Amino acid sequence: MHTLVQASVCLGFCVIMLFTAKAAGGTPALVLSADEAALNSIRSAPACVESDAPPEAVRSIAVETRWEGNVCKASVTNKGSAPVAIKEVLLARIPHQLPGETKLYGEGFTMLSQTGGTLAAPVDIGGYKDAVHYRIPQPQDATVVYGLLTLAPPTGGHLLLGFTSCRRFVGRFYIRDRSIDVVMDTEGLMLAPGESWALEEFMALAGKDRNALLAAFADRINVNHPRLPFDPVPTGWCSWYCFGPAVTATAVVNNLDAIAANRLPLKYIQIDDGYQAAMGDWLETGKAFEGGIKNVLKQIRDASFEPAIWVAPFVAEENSRVFKEHPDWFVRDANGQPLRSDTVTFGGWRCGPWYALDGTNPEAQRHLENVFRTLRQEWGCTYFKLDANFWGAIHGGRFYDPKATRVEAYRQGMAAVLRGAGDAFILGCNHPLWPSLGLIHGARSSNDINRSWDSFSHTTIETFNRNWQNGKLWWNDPDCILLTGKPSDDVFRFHATAICASGGMALSGDNLATTPPEKLDMLRKLLPPTGIAASFQDDTFRIGVIDQKDRRLVCLFNWEDKPQSFDIELPYPCQVHEVWTNKKLGKQKGRLAIKDMPGHSAQLLVLVPGQT
């Protein structure tokens, strides 16, 4: 039997009361709706801790919460004489009566996991579920999301629940038919007698405008984790989507020459996975670069572009030099041996199973700092695409620092990366989302892309659900711009319009040495990025608006396979033209009708104020 610690909450410090799990079953249900009454319900919901320790030991654990407006600050203290292992702290257990049609959105622990749909029928938006692909332990009887949960009842309004910090613990939500648990995962760490832990900050907001709630949420996150500034929005070229791990020095130089010859305004030339001798040995290059990469990087600099490179800093394959020579730098299993990642999670997409560097190990930290200092100062790289960052926050292992959480291990490792990288741009990819707050300049907002309608449409949904993060937490990376291949012109226009509507980074993924002129012109129209993510009317993502200083961009998306018409309210009398076709729609005012837009297509309209 778990003993629960209930917190009776007002706007000041809570009063701690104890009751058993049996007693908790008698708690009266609260009516939860998207208004101020919902916030009051959350403030008064009980808090508790979960532990396998004897009940008398758990009764000595006190949870304190303090509400400052819509922000809750909490701590947990052991007031007894024996250490207690704390699995979780429940900041609020909220019974609700929301209908099954209530729309929900929730983030994942990893950036590849997102949840949408409704309370009655949740939908996996992200390509890889935390519980399935990454095998992160969580309750089987609940829908589990991390960091952020938004709810929209059919009666109207929106409710936002979110964690505005992630320094040590990760926050998550357990959503069941008649309750929502607001949970702090404390990973079973031991709380010593007299010891207190500051928990992560939690925020609850309600209102009619979801975009406004998300903006306020982002502002509060920035109080705890100030955004790493980097301007302008990065542009460039990436080798992965035309050459994959078979990239060669010749392929990179050919694209460099094409970019220069066509005067494409792309700044970074990014060499992706495939240059290294082994996963983990980032300063040793393989046969494809004839034993050296520095000459290619020098050619990039000499052509007045910036060298960029892919690194998976936290992983190493078994045959790598770093793993063979320094196995003590890696996260350990219960027997004290390096933890094979495939025993607790996904083992890696190639050259696996991977082993994960321990970010709490001082020697591993020095190694990370040295690798990135070398890449920055000696190799001249000014942009790092960091992949497989999830493994830096791997679960199920033991760290050098036994008191550290996986969030702390990751953040300490990333701090070492930042020290070495200096002024370079840092892009997080396949990373733990909330633990990366304040540690990266850019964040991949979608799964890997490929040249198909299914991929273009799916990655667009993933990114649009994160538009609120762009320019607030980091620059979103909607993945590469792909304009060559089998899809139709309409599908490519959909994809290009989605890249524009993301407001984020713009890196070409095509072989620009063989890209036809008309596709190069299309690429030019996406440069430079606006840096402003489109605001959408609703979660159908049909009409998005980007307001700039001297014009408005309207992004129209037909997600259906049949023609659709659009009716647009114009903010002012204006001249209108469509970007991809260069069609001039002339002077317009009031409303604009776009008839029978083809299936799986998009239009990008430019509205310039002017008298009609």
Image (cartoon, rainbow, N blue to C red):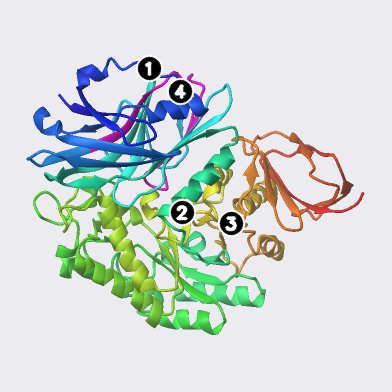
Q: Label 2 crowding class (10 Å Cα cut-off): few <14, some 14-19, many 20+?
A: some
Report, in whole angstroms, how far the alpha carbon at label 4 lies from the one at label 3.
Answer: 44 Å
Residue 482: give its label: 3
Marks 2/4 in contact by CB < 8 Å: the verdict is no
Report, in whole angstroms, how far the alpha carbon at label 2 lies from the one at label 4.
Answer: 28 Å
Residue 29: give its label: 1
Disc 2 versus disc 3: nearer the observer: 2
Q: Residue at x 27, y 41 (%)?
A: 185
Marks 1/2 in contact by CB < 8 Å: the verdict is no
Indicate the secondary structure of the residue bearing disc 3.
loop
Marks 3/1 in contact by CB < 8 Å: the verdict is no
Label 3 sits on what residue type?
A: Leu
Which residue is at the front of the view, 198 or 480?
Answer: 198
Q: Is residue 197 magenta?
A: no
Q: Label 1 crowding class (10 Å Cα cut-off): few <14, some 14-19, many 20+?
A: few
Q: Residue at x 30, y 39 (%)?
A: 184
Q: Is residue 458 visible?
A: no
Label 4 sits on what residue type?
A: Leu
Give percent across and percent down for residue 547.
70, 52
Q: Earlier in the sequence, mark 2 or mark 3?
A: 2
Q: Earlier in the sequence, mark 4 or mark 3?
A: 4
Disc 3 versus disc 1: nearer the observer: 1
Q: Earlier in the sequence, mark 3 or mark 1?
A: 1
Disc 4 versus disc 3: nearer the observer: 4
Q: Which residues are drawn in magenta?
A: 88-117
Q: Label 3 crowding class (10 Å Cα cut-off): few <14, some 14-19, many 20+?
A: many
Q: Earlier in the sequence, mark 1 or mark 2?
A: 1
Q: Is residue 96 magenta?
A: yes
> Would you name the residue on which mark 2 appears?
222
Residue 32: give its label: 4
